[in-house]
Amino acid sequence: MEAPITFAGPGLDRAPEARRRPEWVAERWADPAARTLIASERGVWVERGDGAARPALGRPAELGASPDDAVLLGLDGERPLFAVDAEALDGGAPPGEPVGLRQLAAELSERDAGVVAYAVALLNWHRRHRFCSVCGNASDQVDAGHERRCPACGSSHFPRTDPVIIVAVSDGERLLLGHQAVWPESRYSVLAGYVEPGETLEQAVRREVLEESQVELGEVRYEASQPWPFPSSLMVGFSADARADSIPHADGDELADVRWFTREEVAAAAGWDGQGELLLPQGFSIARRLIDRWLARG
Ligand SMILES: [Zn+2]
């Protein structure tokens, strides 16, 4: 059986109705059982005990922050769980250093990784959307941090999630992998790109693959998706069949190289954790999930 998708939602009760009432949120903030995790642009504060890392959860009352600055992630059973930007704390950032999400992906439990990804995505959005995109006025956080509203023009703004397609293309025998110029020399991955306005996910798959590799696709199939808070994407994973006799050709812009890899080459790289001839994406990424599924299907 496959492992759960890293960064997938942690199954909190997001309390979408109740969180609209500021007095209910203030009560949750004052609840002695409430906890909040703290993040900055650079990552999340964690604690390490007996080898395992966990988000460092503080008591809201002791943090020198107000519920107006915090986002309510939801209820973990009865326990309210918040997230707050280190910049919003009266005393400034807590001691210690925040740890980046890519590193944490390998260290946290699946559930904690989901909590942290959710919190970071929401805090990233607030940090980058302080001003109303309609009139330019500073906007206020409402709905326990799940909305911003502009006091000048009344516009509502909601957290954005940017869809990105990612696709394992095969000609039946081989897998299409591309290499970006900024990556280490031997690193290759499946192709990916942002969905543009006015296109379906499947159209985005066909366009991106054609643009980046000149390969035309036959059937396109949905596989799985993964929240990807760098800063606010949702990776939507597909597999696809290349039309017969497709010859990949890199666009030289997004990709420096793109080519077919045999099943043997990919299988050897998948079992190799060192600097092999072919370096595949990290295990927690959906890119790697798509590659592993392709291998497993034989
Ligand atoms: Zn406005």
Image: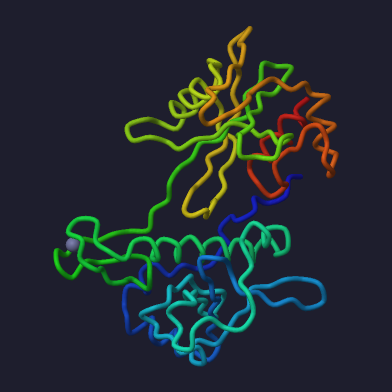
At x 59%, y 35%, the residue is: 223
Location of residue 98 by image quarter: bottom right
Quadrant in which the C terminus is drawn: top right
Which residue is found at the position 39% from the left and 82% from the top? 67
> Residue farthest to the left?
153
| Residue drawn at point x = 64 percent, y = 53 percent | 6
Quadrant that contains the N terminus: top right
* Position in image of residue 148 (x %, y %): 30, 66
Above or below residue 269? Residue 242 is above
Q: How is the image coloured?
A: rainbow
Placement of 275 over or under 88, stated as above or below: above
* 132 and 234: which is toward the camera: 132
Front in this rendered view, residue 271 or 142: 271
Identified at 63% across, 25% down, the residue is 257
Residue 221 in the image: state x and y as whole percent. 56, 28
**Residue 228: horizontal and vertical position, in percent?**
54, 51
246 vs 14, nearest the viewer: 246
Is residue 67 shown left or right of residue 259? left
Image region (quadrant) for ligand 1 = bottom left
Up/down of 160 relative to 36, above or below: above
Question: Residue 286: where, in percent of width, then height?
Answer: 63, 43
Q: Determine whether, in the image, residue 51 is placed left or right of residue 95.
A: right
